[in-house]
Amino acid sequence: MVNRSFRELCVEVKILYPILWKVAQAIKQFEGWNPTNKSWRNKNPGNLRSSAFAETKDEDGYAVFATYEQGMYALCQDLLLKSGGKTSTKLTSTSTLLELMEVYAPADDNNDPRDYAIFIVDHLGLVGFDLDTQIWRLLEDA
């Protein structure tokens, strides 16, 4: 097995799953990625709570990564698994983008999943993508 860097893995995701990559970029933007933000300090563009790739957690329970690329890959991996229905979240590949955001950014964690999903749809700018789009479509070519 070839040991690839997280940077190389991110490039691979960007090429193989361009729509999913755009969703990850939208999440990063929605989470307020900038030098004054916790996600920036934690190198966690998706503000993930947990990840097998995390080094540790911060005082608020968010994953902390060694590099931005490691955090970005963790976000993409999280979306890949959820889009394929391969998590314990009860999401399946036929779940909708809105349902994905209800799991990813739940209302009981002071989020508005609907606004989050609308932001992602607007960021994608793809014909045929709306709140009811099934998440398996994130794995399509652009």
Image (cartoon, rainbow, N blue to C red):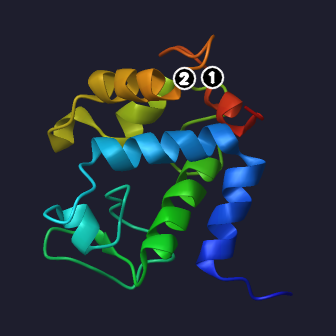
Q: Please tell me which residue is depicted at 28% across the width and 55% down the height of the picture.
A: 33
**Is residue 3 shown left or right of residue 131?**
right
Labelled pair 1, 2 in contact (Cβ < 8 Å): yes
Which residue, given by chain and number where applicable, does mark 1 sit on? 134
Mark 1, secondary structure of its residue: loop
Which one is earlier in the sequence, the residue at label 1 or at label 2?
Answer: 2
- Answer whether residue 9 is visible to the viewer in this image: yes
**Is residue 15 shown left or right of residue 135?**
right
Q: Which mark is residue 96?
A: 2
Q: Which residue occupies the foreground of this view, 83 or 31? A: 31
**Is residue 35 shown left or right of residue 140?**
left
Q: Residue furthest right?
A: 1
Residue type, numbered disc 1:
Gln
Residue type, numbered disc 2:
Thr
How far is disc 1 from disc 2 in space, using C-alphas? 4 Å
Residue 49 at x, y percent in the picture: 32, 62
Alpha-carbon neighbours of circle 2 within 10 Å: few (<14), some, or many (≥20)?
A: many
Q: Which residue occupies the foreground of this view, 124 or 70? A: 124
Mark 2, secondary structure of its residue: loop
